[in-house]
């Protein structure tokens, strides 16, 4: 199995980022994990020319100031055409079907995943995409 080289976690809850990072490091300790606690911080991270652009991005839906949908809209305008192979997953504790439907309307969103299901989907999403 070949895992991705880098991942970006976007969640306003540092505990959630910590748990995700630990799960990722268990899958493969060599994966570079970037963490952001806000949409603005995540965009600043992605704009860093020194950064190995993340192959996988996990973004929380419910965050203060700007939410996951705000991030996705800005991401698609600025980064999607430059990095079309990067995969974005929306994580949430929301079980609202309208949130799922809205998230999956975006070109960049691969899946809408409950935070309760992290252990079952994480390793699969960290695998390098096969062209």
Image: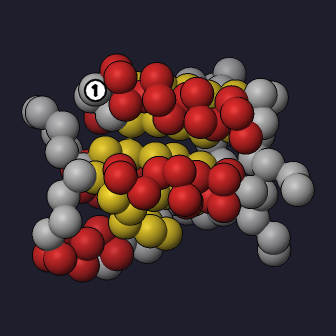
Q: Would you say residue 120 is visible in this rendering?
A: yes
Give the secondary structure at mark 1. loop
Residue shown at 24% from the left, 78% from the top:
101
- Which residue is drawn at the image coordinates 79% and 49% (left, top)? 3
The residue that label 1 is drawn on is 13
Quadrant containing the N terminus in the rendered view = bottom right
Mark 1 closeness class: few <14, some 14–19, many ≥20 residues within 10 Å: few
Q: Residue 26's spot in the image, x, y percent?
A: 70, 33
Percent x, y for residue 72?
Answer: 33, 55
Q: Position of residue 73 (x, y in %)?
A: 29, 57
Residue 97 in percent (x, y) is at: 17, 76
Image height of 65 relative to 75, above or below: above
Image quarter in which the C terminus is found: bottom right
Please give left or right for residue 54 compared with residue 59 in the image.
right
The quarter of the picture where residue 25 lies is top right
State whether residue 74 appears in this view. Answer: no
Foreground: 99 or 106?
99
Is 53 or 35 nearer to us in this picture? 35
Q: How many marks?
A: 1
Residue 13 vs 57, above or below: the answer is above
């Amino acid at each position: 199995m070949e895992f991705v080289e880098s991942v970006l976690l976007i969640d306003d809850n540092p505990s959630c980022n910590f748990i995700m990072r630990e799960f990722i490091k268990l899958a493969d300790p060599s994966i570079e994990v970037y963490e952001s606690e806000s949409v603005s911080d995540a965009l600043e991270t992605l704009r860093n020319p020194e950064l190995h652009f993340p192959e996988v991005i996990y973004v929380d839906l419910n965050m203060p100031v700007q939410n996951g949908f705000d991030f996705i809209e800005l991401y698609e305008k600025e980064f999607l055409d430059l990095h079309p192979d990067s995969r974005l997953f929306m994580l949430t504790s929301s079980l609202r079907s309208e949130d799922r439907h809205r998230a999956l309307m975006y070109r960049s969103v691969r899946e809408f995943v409950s935070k309760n299901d992290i252990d079952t989907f994480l390793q699969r999403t960290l695998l390098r995409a096969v062209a």
